[in-house]
Image: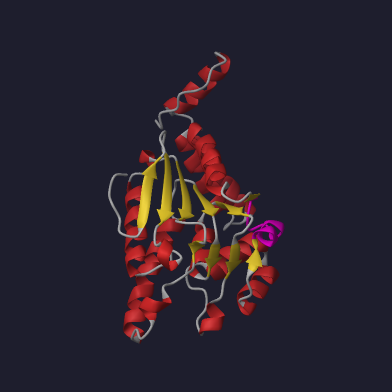
Amino acid sequence: MDRDYETVRAEDRGEGLLLLTLNRPDLANAMNTQMGRDLLAFFDELNAAPGQQRCIVVTGAGERAFCAGGDLKERNGMTDEAWQDQHLLFERMIRAFIGCPVPVIGAVNGAAYAGGGELALCCDFIYAAETARFALTEVTLGIMPGAGGTQNLPRAVGERRAKEIILTGRPFTAAEAYEWGMVNRVCAPGQVVEEALETGRRIADNAPISVRQAKHAIHFGLQMDLASAMMLEIEAYNRMVPTEDRREGVLAFNEKRKPRFKGR
């Protein structure tokens, strides 16, 4: 992806691996209207041609914050209509993010508060620096999570824990997020992006159609009864049978070499 954005930076790390950085470090990478536009454009482009990338790692610029949430300076004095117009943009962006067929790893390098925490929760899984902090603080501001937080958080930590987190607005540590199942790995300071990229490379080495279909089956299967989900899994599985990559994977195994997957 070679287009330039005002508030995010997309870097090609080779072999289908992309590093996406929220890039407003002077403002703790807070999400303003332009960032909403940039993220929507990024995911719309990716979703339209998922074969162009194999894995995405998302992080924040600097060491202080992943994303501090919505830009409250921009929102100060907004009319109700302007606020709702902005939020409609954010809603479209979140749907595009969650709908991304390519795996997305969150590399949370600092504070992920309110909308920033919700962005992290949109990722398929999260690595966090030891110093990272999370919170969904919306109720302390007279609003509530509106970027998937009330849905993605309970799916990660369970209903009761999610209610405690959201209704108190209380911050919690990376270690707590790991203990509760929200975070997959806690990393030493300064290592979270590299560790996420290392995992991203491992994913990018695998057959891309297989990876996308497996992600699809997991995500949508969890929203179904078991019998329907099993049928979805078989439908996803059968997509692999006629592919070149399936034949290449079996051939490479028998020839005792690394497979060369092409996404076909």
Please identify the residue farthest to the top as the structure is shown: 255
Asked if residue 160 shows in the view, the reply is yes
Asked if residue 234 shows in the view, the reply is no
In percent of the image, x 45 and y 37: which residue is there?
209
Q: Where 110 sits versus 15, above or below?
A: below
In percent of the image, x 39 and y 78: which residue is there?
73
Task: Write down the region rendered in magenta.
Answer: 174-185
Direction from residue 246 to residue 44 in the image, left or right: left
- The x and y percentages for residue 118 are 51, 65
Does 125 lie within the magenta span? no
Does 178 lie within the magenta span? yes
How many marks the image carries: the answer is 0
What colouring does the structure picture have? secondary structure
In percent of the image, x 52 and y 74: which residue is there?
145
Quarter of the rendering occupied by the N terminus:
top left
Q: Where 255 sits versus 140, above or below?
A: above
In percent of the image, x 63 and y 58: which residue is there?
182
Direction from residue 5 to residue 242 in the image, left or right: right
Quarter of the rendering occupied by the C terminus:
top left
- The x and y percentages for residue 163 are 65, 74
